[in-house]
Image (tube, rainbow, N blue to C red):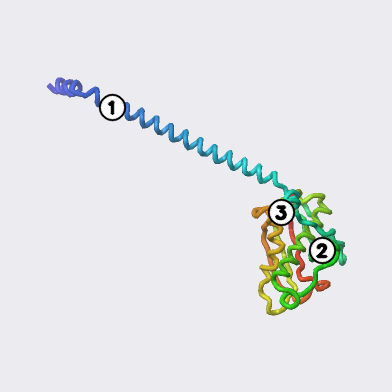
């Protein structure tokens, strides 16, 4: 009697219900495959976009940015003491302290907080950055050989009560960001005040660069 009952129960199964379950499983599997395929396509598009953006960024060189900005470099300065304007060790280039040299070969002068305001000091820092670019180009042959800015150290010739040293040195840092981009043109930095600089220049800046 037990075998008969089990057989009867087996015969009572609904074929339509079993077919519906199989259809649902197939549909779920198909949807899962479709979603994975869509996700892979989206990832591929993002990766392609990133590669294209990277290629576009690389095409805009430091030298071409310099030209597009219409910037004029002063003559590369000669040492004012027993030192080299730029020393290369491995993949690092150490730029000695530079001042704001004009295209005519004269220095900008004045003490920030007394002779100059913060805006004029910032202009002097930007001109100092251009002077450093001139030294880089003379030694390396091209600004495109620079991989990135590593460290900027800026001195501001100022009065004792002047406190805006970082905003003054921004003149140089902002220039480097224009030349090499915000990612590679902005590095670590120090900006401090001093009561005197050679020839009464407003700022003196030294920089460490990483080379390609």
Residue lying farthest to the bottom in this orientation: 160
Circle 3 is placed at which residue position? 179
**C-alpha gap between disc 1 and disc 2:** 85 Å
Taking depth in this image into account, of 4 and 200 the one nearest to the observer is: 200
Disc 3 from disc 1: Cα separation: 66 Å
Q: Position of residue 119 (x, y in %)?
A: 70, 69
Q: Within 10 angstroms of label 3, few (less than 14), some, or many (20 or more) residues?
A: many
- Mark 2, Cα crowd under 10 Å, few <14 / some 14-19 / many 20+, is some
Q: Can residue 36 be seen from the camera position used here?
A: yes
**x, y percent for residue 30:** 40, 30
User: Mark 2 highlights which residue?
Assistant: 102
Q: Nearer the viewer, residue 73 or 186?
A: 73
Find the distance from the CA under tag 2 to the CA under tag 3.
Answer: 19 Å
Q: Earlier in the sequence, mark 3 or mark 1?
A: 1
User: Which residue bears the numbered disc 1?
Assistant: 20
Taking 55 as reference, is 207 left or right? right
Q: Is residue 38 above or below residue 153?
A: above
């Amino acid at each position: 009697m037990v075998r008969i009952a089990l057989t009867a129960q087996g015969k009572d199964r609904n074929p339509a219900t079993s077919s519906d379950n199989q259809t649902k499983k197939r549909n779920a599997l198909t949807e899962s495959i479709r979603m994975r395929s869509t996700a892979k396509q989206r990832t591929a598009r993002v990766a392609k976009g990133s590669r294209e953006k990277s290629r576009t960024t690389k095409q805009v060189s430091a030298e071409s940015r310099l030209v597009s900005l219409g910037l004029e470099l002063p003559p590369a300065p000669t040492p004012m003491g027993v030192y080299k304007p730029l020393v290369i060790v491995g993949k690092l280039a150490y730029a000695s302290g530079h001042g704001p040299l004009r295209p005519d070969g004269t220095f900008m002068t004045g003490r920030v907080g007394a002779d100059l305001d913060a805006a004029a000091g910032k202009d002097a820092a930007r001109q100092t950055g251009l002077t450093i670019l001139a030294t880089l180009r003379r030694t390396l042959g091209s600004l495109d050989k620079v991989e990135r800015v590593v460290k900027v150290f800026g001195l501001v010739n100022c009065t004792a009560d002047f406190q805006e040293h970082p905003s003054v040195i921004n003149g140089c840092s902002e220039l480097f960001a224009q030349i090499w981009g915000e990612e590679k043109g902005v590095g670590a930095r120090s900006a401090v005040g001093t009561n005197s600089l050679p020839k009464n220049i407003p700022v003196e800046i030294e920089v460490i660069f990483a080379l390609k």
